[in-house]
C-alpha cells in the first residue's frame, strides 16, 4: 500500500524525489508488490487545490483512489461480546461508514465542482480518464446539464449517504451562479467505487442511455490502450514474468484470467503479430469488447474482455475465427485454482502481514486521519474487528490465511489470528470478482490453526527489529562503521552508520561499497535546500544493484527512530516499500516529514559544507532535481572503516547478527 501518513502538498512533492523512477517494463502501469488492480484517479481538489485555469493543472492534481468496501459478514458470539466491551454497536459502525461515504463525496465530487469550472473538466476528460472512461462521461453529462441551466457551481453540499442493495447513494445539493439550486445523485458500489450518477428528475438509466455512444467509444479506446497494445507490444513471457513478481498490471484476479487466455493463444499460434479492437457492446450491467488477435502463423482469434458497469475488467474469453470457445475445462480449472491461490497470497501480504507488524491502535490512527489501506468501509470494519480481537486476546502474534473459497459475489478468505494469550479467532474477508475487499468481520476460529509454513513461504513474518535507537545526529547513535564518500572535485564526506539500528540497510550499503559498486557513479538528483541523491548505475533514477532489501522504517513494520534532519543518510526507493537497493540520499535541511517512510541509517560527521556546495552548484533541468549527465558530481569511491578501538570482525558480527532473519 502507499504511504499512509497525512502530508502537506509540498512535503509529498519532496517525498517523491526520494523514490527511484520506476521502469514500467513496457506495460505502462506500475504496481507495488501486493497492490490491488488498477486504481482509479480522482481530482485532488481533495487535497485542497483551488482555481485551476487549464486542464494540465487539473491533471497535476489527481490522486490514486484506494477504493473502499462495505457489507458485513455474520460473526460469532465472541466477536459480539468484544463489541460490547468496546462500546461500539453494529449501528454505530454503520453510522460511521455512512458518514465516511458522505465525507468522501464532499471532499471529491463537491470540492471538484466548486474549484474547477465545467469547461476545464470537460476538456480534461476529452483526452484523459479522471475517474474512469464510463463514469467520466456520465459525470460530464450531469454537470453539463446543470451548467447550461445555472452556470458555474458556486456551492455543493453532500447529503447523508444511503445504503441499498447495490451499494451507496449520495445526493449533492448544488447552487449555481444564478442563485438557483438543483441536485445530482452519485451511486457507488459496495466498495464505494463511483458507478454512475444522475440529475434530479432523471434516473441512472437515463444518464447511461444519454451517453451510451460515448461510453462504447471510450471503452473501446481504453481496451485498445491497455490490452490490445499490450498484446502486440510485449510477449506473453514478458507479461508472465512481470505479474509473477507480484507487480500486477490490472490486479491479482484479472491478470491471471487475461494471462491464462493469452498463454492459450501463444501456445497455439505464437506471439501476437497484431491486435485490434473490433467491436464493443453494452449489456445491462456490463460491457464487452472484442480484440482481433493475429498470431505468428496468421491465425486470427477473438479475445473478449468483459467489464462491469464501472469499466473494470472482470472476465475474458477466447474464440477462434468461427466463434468456437477455445478454453478447455483444464484451462478454466487452472485459472480458477490460481485465482484462489492469488487471493490467498494477496490477503496474507496485505492483511495478515499488516496485523502482525502493526497494532490496532496505529491502524485506528490511520483511519481517523482518513489514510486508508484497503478502502473506506472495509478499513472501518477491519479496525472494528482488530480492536475486538485485541481486547480479547492482546496483540496479534501470528496471522495466516487459511481457506479461500469462491462466493456468489467473488471470494471469501479466512485469516486465522493468534493473540498474545495464544487464543485463536478468524477474520472473515470478502473480496469481489475484481479482487477488491468488500467486507471484514471477526468470527470463531473453529478448527483452524496458524499455518506457519505459509507465513514462511510468503515471507510475511514480522521483521526482526533493530535497536530502536532514537537519534538526530551521529552523537546519538551506536557507530559500527564510517563511510568516507570521496566526491570528485569536492572532497570527502564522512558518514557514521549504525548497523544495530538498521541492520539490513547498513549491511547492504557496506557490501556494495566494499565491492566497489559505487566507484564512478554519480549524484543524479540534487535539490538545493532539500537533499542530494546518488548511487544509481543508470544515472537517471531508474537503476540499482542486483538485490533489493527490506525497508527498515515504521510504515513497513520496522522501528526506525532516526530522524531525517540535516546530515541524515537514507535509502531511496520506489513505491514498493522493499525496493531499495543502491540509491541513497543525504539530507541538506531538516526534512522530518520523511520519518517513518524511508530508512535512515546514519549521519554525516564531516563534510556537510561539501553537501551545501554541491547543492549550490547544481543546475537541475526540472523541479525534480534532475541533473544532466555531464554535470553530475562523481563518486570516486566509498571507503568503509571502523570506529577507533573496534575491529572489522566485531563490526561485521554486529551486521550479521542483527540482519539474521527471525526464527
Image (cartoon, rainbow, N blue to C red):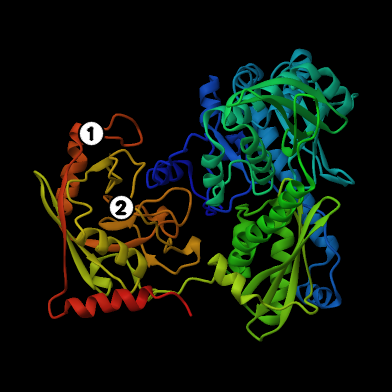
Q: Does residue 496 sit above or below 531 in this rendering? A: below
* Image coords of residue 367 (percent x, y): 64, 57
Residue 6 visible somewhere in the drawing:
yes
Disc 1 to disc 2, C-alpha distance: 18 Å
Left or right: residue 102 compared with residue 586: right
* 619 vs 148, nearest the viewer: 619
* 183 vs 484, nearest the viewer: 484
Within 10 Å of disc 2 (Cα), the crowding (few <14, some 14-19, many 20+) is many
Q: Nearer the N terminus, badge 1 or badge 2?
A: 2
How many numbered tags mark residues here?
A: 2
Residue 46's image quarter? top right
Q: Which residue is mark 2?
A: 584
Element assignment for label 1: helix
* Image coords of residue 295 (percent x, y): 61, 27
The residue at 68%/51% (across/down) is 375
* 138 vs 31, nearest the viewer: 31
Element assignment for label 2: strand
Numbered circle sitting on residue 305 = none
Residue 129 visible somewhere in the drawing:
no
* Image coords of residue 26 (percent x, y): 48, 34
Within 10 Å of disc 1 (Cα), the crowding (few <14, some 14-19, many 20+) is few
The residue at 79%/68% (across/down) is 88
Q: Which residue is mark 1?
A: 629
Residue that lies at the very extreme toward the bottom in this rendered image: 421
Residue 538's image quarter? top left
The residue at 65%/18% (across/down) is 122
* Image coords of residue 456 (percent x, y): 55, 71
Left or right: residue 503 compared with residue 33: left
Question: Are the residues at dot 1 and dot 2 in contact (C-beta closer than 8 Å)?
Answer: no
Amino acid at each position: 500500500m502507499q504511504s499512509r501518513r497525512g502530508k502537506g502538498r509540498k512535503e509529498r512533492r519532496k517525498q517523491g524525489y526520494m523514490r527511484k523512477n520506476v521502469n514500467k517494463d513496457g506495460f505502462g502501469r506500475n504496481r507495488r508488490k501486493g497492490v490491488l488492480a488498477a486504481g482509479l484517479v480522482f481530482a485532488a481538489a481533495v487535497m485542497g487545490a483551488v482555481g485551476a485555469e487549464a486542464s494540465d493543472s487539473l491533471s497535476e492534481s489527481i490522486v490514486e483512489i484506494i477504493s473502499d468496501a462495505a457489507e458485513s459478514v455474520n460473526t460469532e458470539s465472541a466477536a459480539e461480546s468484544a463489541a460490547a466491551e468496546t462500546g461500539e454497536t453494529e449501528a454505530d459502525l454503520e453510522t460511521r461508514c455512512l458518514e465516511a461515504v458522505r465525507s468522501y463525496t464532499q471532499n471529491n465530487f463537491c470540492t471538484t465542482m466548486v474549484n474547477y469550472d465545467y469547461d476545464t473538466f470537460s476538456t480534461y476528460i476529452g483526452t484523459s480518464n479522471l475517474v474512469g472512461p464510463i463514469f467520466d462521461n456520465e459525470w460530464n453529462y450531469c454537470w453539463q446539464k446543470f451548467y447550461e441551466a445555472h452556470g458555474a457551481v458556486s456551492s455543493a453540499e453532500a447529503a447523508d449517504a444511503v445504503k441499498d442493495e447495490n451499494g451507496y447513494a449520495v445526493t449533492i445539493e448544488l447552487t449555481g451562479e444564478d442563485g438557483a439550486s438543483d441536485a445530482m445523485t452519485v451511486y457507488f458500489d459496495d466498495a464505494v467505487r463511483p458507478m454512475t450518477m444522475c440529475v434530479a428528475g432523471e434516473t441512472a438509466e437515463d444518464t447511461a442511455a444519454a451517453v451510451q455512444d460515448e461510453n462504447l467509444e471510450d471503452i473501446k479506446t481504453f481496451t485498445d490502450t491497455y490490452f490490445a497494445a499490450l498484446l502486440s507490444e510485449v510477449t506473453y513471457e514478458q507479461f508472465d514474468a512481470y505479474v509473477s513478481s507480484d507487480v500486477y498490471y490490472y490486479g491479482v484476479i484479472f491478470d491471471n484470467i487475461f494471462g491464462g487466455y493469452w498463454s492459450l493463444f501463444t501456445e497455439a499460434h505464437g506471439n501476437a503479430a497484431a491486435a485490434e479492437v473490433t467491436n464493443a457492446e453494452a449489456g445491462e450491467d456490463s460491457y464487452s469488447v472484442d480484440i482481433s488477435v493475429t498470431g505468428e502463423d496468421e491465425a486470427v482469434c477473438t479475445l473478449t474482455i468483459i467489464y462491469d458497469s464501472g469499466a473494470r475488467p472482470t472476465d475474458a474469453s477466447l474464440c477462434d475465427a468461427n466463434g468456437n470457445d477455445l478454453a478447455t475445462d483444464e484451462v478454466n480449472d487452472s485459472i480458477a485454482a490460481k485465482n484462489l491461490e492469488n487471493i490467498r497470497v494477496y490477503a496474507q501480504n496485505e492483511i495478515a502481514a499488516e496485523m502482525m507488524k502493526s497494532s490496532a491502535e496505529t491502524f485506528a490512527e490511520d483511519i481517523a486521519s482518513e489514510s486508508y489501506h484497503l478502502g473506506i468501509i472495509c478499513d472501518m470494519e477491519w479496525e472494528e474487528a482488530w480492536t475486538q480481537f485485541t481486547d480479547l486476546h492482546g496483540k496479534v502474534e501470528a496471522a495466516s490465511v487459511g481457506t479461500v473459497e469462491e462466493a456468489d459475489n467473488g471470494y471469501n478468505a479466512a485469516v486465522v489470528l493468534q493473540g498474545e494469550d495464544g487464543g485463536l479467532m478468524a477474520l472473515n474477508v470478502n473480496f469481489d470478482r475484481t479482487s477488491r475487499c468488500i467486507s471484514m468481520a471477526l468470527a470463531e476460529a473453529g478448527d483452524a490453526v496458524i499455518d506457519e509454513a505459509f507465513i514462511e513461504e510468503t515471507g510475511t513474518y514480522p521483521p526482526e527489529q533493530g535497536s530502536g535507537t532514537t537519534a538526530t545526529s551521529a552523537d546519538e547513535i551506536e557507530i559500527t562503521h564510517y563511510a568516507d564518500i570521496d566526491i570528485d572535485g569536492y572532497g570527502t564526506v564522512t558518514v557514521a552508520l549504525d548497523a544495530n539500528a538498521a541492520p539490513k540497510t547498513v549491511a547492504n550499503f557496506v557490501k556494495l561499497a566494499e565491492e566497489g559498486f559505487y566507484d564512478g557513479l554519480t549524484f543524479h538528483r540534487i535539490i538545493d535546500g532539500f537533499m542530494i541523491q546518488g548511487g544509481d548505475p543508470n544515472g537517471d533514477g531508474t537503476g540499482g544493484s542486483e538485490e533489493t532489501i527490506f525497508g527498515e522504517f515504521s510504515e513497513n513494520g520496522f522501528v526506525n527512530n532516526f530522524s531525517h534532519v540535516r546530515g541524515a543518510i537514507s535509502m531511496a526507493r520506489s513505491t514498493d516499500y522493499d525496493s531499495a537497493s543502491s540509491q541513497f540520499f543525504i539530507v541538506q535541511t531538516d526534512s522530518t516529514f520523511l520519518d517513518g517512510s524511508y530508512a535512515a541509517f546514519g549521519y554525516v560527521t564531516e563534510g556537510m559544507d561539501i553537501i551545501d556546495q554541491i547543492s549550490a552548484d547544481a543546475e537541475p533541468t526540472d523541479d525534480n532535481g534532475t541533473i544532466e549527465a555531464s554535470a553530475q558530481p562523481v563518486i570516486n569511491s566509498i571507503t568503509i572503516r571502523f570506529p577507533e578501538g573496534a575491529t572489522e570482525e566485531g563490526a561485521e558480527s554486529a551486521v550479521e547478527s542483527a540482519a539474521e532473519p527471525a526464527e
